Amino acid sequence: MGCAKRNFSYASGRKGRRTILGCREIMLPLLLIQWTLLAEGSSAASVPAKPGWWNVREAGACGDGQADNTAIFQRLLDEAGAQGGGAVFVPPGRYRIAGTLRIPANVRLEGIFRFSPTLRWGRQDDLPGSVLLAEAGRAQPAESPFIRLAGNNAAVIGLVIYYPEISPQEVPPVPYPPCLLAEGVENVSIQDCLLVNPFEAIHLKRAARHLVRNVMGYPIWRGIYVDECYDIGRIENVHFWPFGVAYRPENPYCRWINLSGVAFEFARTDWQYVLNTFCFGYGVGYKFSQSAQGSANGNFLGIGADSCQRAVLVEQCQPPGLLITNGEFVGRWTSQDAIALEIGPEAAGVVSLVNCSFWGPLDRCVLMSSKRGQLLLNSCHFCEWDVSLRGAAALELAGGRSLVQACTFQQEGRWHLRVSPDVEQVLIMGVQVRGRFFSDNQAPDKTTIIPPGCAEASLPRESREQYRINIGQPGDEPFLLLFHGAEQAERSFRWSSARSFLVLPVIPGKNYEVVLEAAVPPHLAPGAFGVYLAEQKLGVLSTGQNRLVLPAIGGDEVVLEIRGPAWVPAEHNRRSKDYRPLGIQLFSVAVRALGDPS
């Protein structure tokens, strides 16, 4: 009843009499004509309350979430387009749109917001402001988008868009067409919107000079896709995060997005500008793919991807490159195989990162597999990696050319660098690490490391006759690889992993006695952990002091491996929240030369 009353008030011209004062002799005949046309069921164009401004509520739209408003919205959009452009305003309310909408050239569909509204978890009935309830296209992803920006300079501003028929209980999610699509048009804009739960949020193809700004939401399958943009497009202040859902890594809905969803995807773009964007909980945060028209280049400043299986995935890029500055990249929560930056084997361009940071549950920070591309890392910070302690390196360089300079590695006792024989050229210079720089370099003739390391497990010759390492005390770092962090109970110690290494300085040609003071968890079988020199088993470990005799070697250090079955405390004690793969406790290592040096 309220919607009908507003419609009558608008059609009768009451708004006109209030806004055009002193024109009764002109307005009365016009109002009589308008009344007659309305009574006869005419579809004559509405007279906007002010030039270039149409109000959907005054035209009869109901914001009760029940009535279908598709026809009213589309009629006003068409009228605005026929007048050469204008704004179709959506007052606060919940407007059900059962069909699809097309926005003509120079027309904007506009809600109340001039910022990005947000929604935490809770009742979707609490969605604020100008809300469109989208229904069309369920299980028909190739059909028309919910809103097509169909002309140059078309815009969507200040709206909340919600799909009430999409349920977090449906996994895998039911596909839909894109929520907002622009194809073959220029200068389109999407601003100040919350896209709560679209299957695909924004699809831009041949949409030069697009502007996407201040957009938030939790797209399911893909957030933004850009292709065939031959003049600079801009994406700014976009935040994809689990709005409307209480995120849990193992929740089936969140897990599906966290493994299969893509927040940002760029195919052929010529200097895409992306500024201050963020995503949380996606399979891929930023994906650089290749369409039939080519791949991307661009400027990516202040981008972030948290809890992603792949924060950045480069399948292909143009020779001018992807320029990424001030990025922060975090592995998927609870995962053990997440990679922050992966560059695929076919990528041919330059991927350049400056002042970026990597942390969280990562297996590797960077995997460079490109056969003919180039990776540049400058002033980057590698905080955490090898979350499962399986021996992964922070930087794994398996192909192409790489230049790493002025970077910091903040995790001690891990492989910092692994270089494959298939690389073309690698240059590492000016890096800083905690403890020793551990490099697994399988292509020494193609690799230059300046300096060759930072802190070596080196001792003066006279000290190598006899020394002791107190595990868990400051200074033990250069001697240990793939141990857990220092702990303190009655005394300091570290847990080993399934495969941990001791790097011990020796005098070439001398035999040595090594005494390992250890504690083996009682639930492990006797002899579960052994000590190896390469593949030669020197002995097994038990609780207490374990004496080993090392054969003379020709080098100035010996590497001993402590190997056995890893175990997880939380699997042995339901009260434990410790999910680390542990081995044995190591308290000290005493090293003593036997006989005269050769």
Image: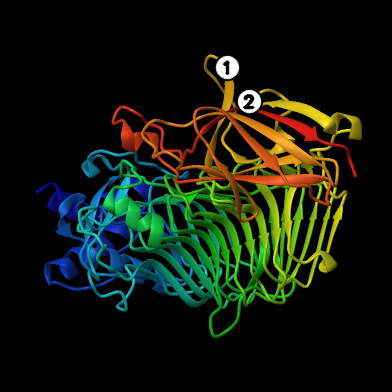
Please indicate whether residue 72 sits to the left or right of residue 118 in the image.
left
Q: Secondary structure at mark 2?
A: loop
Q: Residue 593, how many percent across, how many down? A: 80, 34
Q: Which residue is mark 2?
A: 472
Q: Residue 504, how many percent across, how many down? A: 74, 39
Q: Which residue extends farthest left?
A: 1
Residue 491: which disc?
Answer: 1
Q: Which residue extends farthest front?
A: 595
Q: Amino acid at mark 2?
A: Gly
Q: Quadrant of residue 517?
A: top right
Residue 435: which disc?
Answer: none
Residue at x 49%, y 46% (from the top left corner) = 564
Q: Secondary structure at mark 1?
A: loop
| Residue in the foreground of this view, choosing between 148 and 262 | 262
Q: Quadrant of residue 448?
A: bottom right
Tag 1: Cα neighbours inside 10 Å, few (<14), some, or many (≥20)? Answer: few
With respect to residue 219, does 321 lie above or below? below
Q: Amino acid at mark 1?
A: Arg
On the question of residue 435 being in view, the answer is no
| Residue in the foreground of this view, choosing between 225 and 390 | 390
Q: Earlier in the sequence, mark 2 or mark 1?
A: 2
Q: Residue 254, how many percent across, how many down? A: 33, 51
Q: Which residue extends farthest bottom?
A: 292
Please indicate whether residue 174 sits to the left or right of residue 493 in the image.
left
| Residue in the foreground of this view, choosing between 517 and 207 | 517
